Image (cartoon, helix red, strand yellow):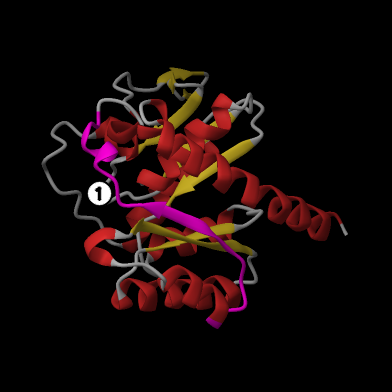
Amino acid sequence: TTVAVNLAVSLAKQGHAVGLLDADIDCPNAARAIGVTEPPEMEDNQFIPPEVHGVKVMSMGFFQKNEEEAIIWRGPMIHNAINQFLQNTDWGDLDYLIVDLPPGTSDAPLTIMQVLQLDGFLVVTTPQSLAKLDAKRSINMIKKMNVNVLGVVENLSGGVFGSGAGEELAKETDLPFLGRLELLSDYRDSKLPTVLESERVRDEYLRLVESIGPRMAEALEQAAG
């Protein structure tokens, strides 16, 4: 979620039209992380997503009476909720729709891959070996679904967690390594997305956007061909 939110804001600050879909139905955190509190409006049976920092946001979190209560839904209900968000949301004309997915190979990513024609996945791992293993499982699932993987990013890199799992994972799966996002105290202040408050974090995400650009262009060329 941290990567999805800061990436979306970084793209918006470059002048792109950006949407952020929180597809983590069980534990929706994207709206809180980006700092939007106004729920979507309804117009002609369509959700009009609220916009903050130049990003339009849709999340299950808008429909929770109490954000501390668990959403205990089985697969079909998660599938239906994601479908409703996709079909009944008026995003307008977007350059990018960033989809924040829960970790692993659960119903949410499967539904997204079945319903949306995705340009590609950005796979995020942390330096720990178990996180790397879970990320590799996700990559294998994405490839089986014939969806493009843009590359691998290592989050929470450095410090007590060490580093290197992202590069190892990229090498093992023959994917580009798109960079590290350091474990920094800058993330403690959560009033705003960190790219808006920390120059160091902003620079990291600008480098990430630059790394993704060529991969996105390649994916679009393949889709057009």
Where is residue 163, by image quadrant? bottom left
Across and down, in percent, residue 195 comes to 42, 32
Q: Residue at x 32, y 60 (%)?
A: 158
Q: Residue at x 30, y 72 (%)?
A: 128
The quadrant of the image that shows the C terminus is bottom right
Residue at image mark 1:
27
Determine whether 29 is above or below 175 in the image.
above
Residue 90 falls inside the magenta stretch: no
How many numbered circles are shown? 1
Left or right for 156, reference 141: left
**In this view of the protein, which residue sits in the foreground, 117 or 123?**
123
Across and down, in percent, residue 42 comes to 43, 19
Residue density around tag 1, few if under 14, some if 14–19, many if 20 or more, within 10 Å: some
Determine whether 148 is above or below 25 in the image.
below
Left or right for 35, reference 8: left
Q: Residue at x 22, y 63 (%)?
A: 160
| Residue type indicated by callout 1 | Cys
Q: Which residues are magenta?
A: 172-190
The residue furthest right is 225
Where is residue 113, by image quadrant? bottom right
Q: Is residue 23 visible?
A: yes
Left or right for 214, reference 149: right
**In this view of the protein, which residue sits in the foreground, 75 or 142?**
142
Determine whether 121 is above or below 164 in the image.
above
**In this view of the protein, which residue sits in the foreground, 154 or 106?**
154
